[in-house]
Image (cartoon, grey):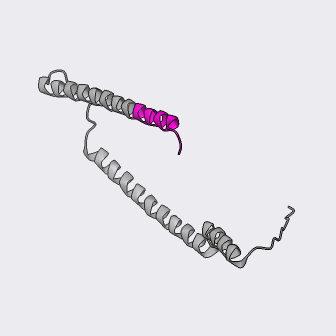
Amino acid sequence: MMRFVVRVLTPSRLRRALWSRLDARYVTKPDHRQDIKDTLWEIQMLRREVVALRGEIDRLRRTTPAQPARPAPSDGRAAEAHRLATETAEALDTLLQSEMRIWQAIDDLSARVAATRPVG
């Protein structure tokens, strides 16, 4: 790989400002090593948490029998509660989708107004 070095006469203040700005964009090797160590430590902690959660899930599965997704048809109150919960969830989903469309329309309208507004 060829490297070209261009030297230009620049005032020292400008050179210092440029180098400080470039130096601020890059991480030093010791900082980078510490970030890697911190990340590895965090990964190990998350692994331990996942193992603990899997153990808890297995324990709960052993102690709790599988629950049916829907209540038995003979239980009228449970079936009614399930129906109402399902209808509420569908209505809430529709409401949230409508709200999202409204905010998208507002954003689009704001962008159009900003584009037609004269600069100055």
Q: Which residue is depicted at the point 64% across and 71% down?
A: 23
Q: At which x and y percent is residue 1?
A: 85, 61
Q: Would you say the magenta stretch is mainly helix, strand or loop?
A: helix
> From the viewer's perspective, is 101 left or right of 69?
right
In the figure, 117 relative to 70: above or below?
Answer: below
Q: At which x and y percent is residue 96?
A: 33, 32
Residue lying at the far left of the rendered structure: 77
Residue lying at the far front of the rendered structure: 120
Closer-to-camera residue (64/79):
79
In the figure, 9 relative to 64: above or below?
Answer: below
Q: Which residue is depicted at the point 41% across and 31% down?
A: 105
Task: State the image quarter where residue 49 is shown.
Answer: bottom left
> From the viewer's perspective, is 82 left or right of 62?
left
Q: At which x and y percent is residue 37?
A: 54, 70
Closer-to-camera residue (106/49):
106
User: What span is in magenta?
Assistant: 104-120
Closer-to-camera residue (14/87):
14
Q: Which residue is depicted at the point 46% across and 33% down?
A: 108
Residue lying at the far bottom of the rendered structure: 12
Task: State the image quarter where residue 35 is shown.
Answer: bottom right
Asked if residue 59 can be seen in this view, the reply is: yes
Q: Which residue is depicted at the point 80% across and 73% down?
A: 9
Asked if residue 69 can be seen in this view, the reply is: no
Q: Is residue 80 magenta?
A: no
Residue lying at the far top of the rendered structure: 73
> From the viewer's perspective, is 99 left or right of 113?
left
Task: State the image quarter where residue 77 is shown.
Answer: top left
In the figure, 30 relative to 26: above or below?
Answer: below
Closer-to-camera residue (61/24):
24
